[in-house]
Amino acid sequence: MTIRTGAPVVVGVDGSAAGLDAVRVAVQEAAHRRRTLRVVHAFIWPLLGVPVGPAPGAPAGGGLRHEAERHVAQAVAEAGKVAPQVPVTGVVVDGAATAVMLAESRDAALVVLGHRGLGGFTGLLVGSVSVQVSARAHCPVLVVRGEPHPGGPVLVGVDGSELSAAAIEFAFAEAAYRDVPLVAVHAWLFPSPAGPGEALPVVYDGDYQGDDVNRILSESVAGYLERYPQVVVRHRLVRGTAAHVLVEESKNAGLLVVGAHGRGALSGLLLGSVSHAVLHHAHAPLVVVRHQPERH
């Protein structure tokens, strides 16, 4: 898990209902991490040359900038209702949503985004904003989507890669925070060639292949069991494509955690069909862990 002394949880808001859902999740994340919460509104209008103040003769509280400030104030107030013990600050930052959130991620422990939005966040999960932020952020990114499953397990996709290990570490910490089980899932298909030009054997042992990928799954989580002895771990070895398996398994999960990309069943995450399936169709909030986290 990314550990930065004093780093806040950052949530992007825009006045939409999805943005307030993100705030409620973000402040709870801040509470169990003992972090502050930073509420950010990306204000793109100055970049477009649009007047942002009140129109001539209009009330002093009018205009786009005052509206943005009201969105932030509403989000800060909502956070206070959910977790009054968490210190919360709010800010309007001039810039496009992607650029603003990427800059915020440099000093954040976690970035939280709603699944859809208005203004600067329009098209989130159907356009480039979510893909760019998730793929390029300097900290894990949590996209709030799906139906809440209080007490549901933390689900993590495992493929044996180094980036998968970063996701596993984050998932263990989340399961410990939430006091819920961790479900480690490895999706696999039939054997594939080891390299270009190499052929598959005409006959192979399916049970042997299953044992092989099960070993990958077990070894991937073994290193974290001593660090998180309180976490109950379940293994799920499922034949199928990563996209289908992760979406189906997320139906009863409280949180789904994946690496930015990996190899094998999870290769291409955030670059092709797997990313689109998970981002569009997951039934639980999704965390993308991009790179190896900092450690104590």
Image (cartoon, helix red, strand yellow):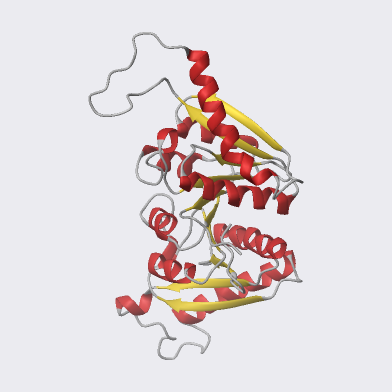
How many numbered discs, if any?
0
Q: Position of residue 277 (x, y in %)?
A: 44, 38
Above or below, 132 relative to 276: below
Residue 263: quadrant of the picture: top left
Residue 222 point in image, percent of width and height: 63, 39
Q: Is residue 184 left or right of residue 28?
A: left
Quarter of the image with the N terminus is bottom right
Residue 67 in view here: no
Determine if residue 62 is in view: yes
Lateral position of residue 283 relative to residue 64, left or right: right
**Residue 170 percent coordinates (x, y):** 59, 52
Q: Is residue 42 above or below residue 294?
A: below
Q: Is residue 40 left or right of residue 81?
A: left
- Quarter containing the C terminus: bottom right
Q: Quadrant of residue 203?
A: top left
Q: Residue at x 74, y 67 (%)?
A: 81
Residue at 57 percent across and 41 percent down: it is 156
Q: Is residue 36 above or below residue 284?
A: below
The image shows residue 195 at horizontal and vertical percentages of 29, 29
- Taking depth in this image into account, of 207 and 54 the one nearest to the observer is 207
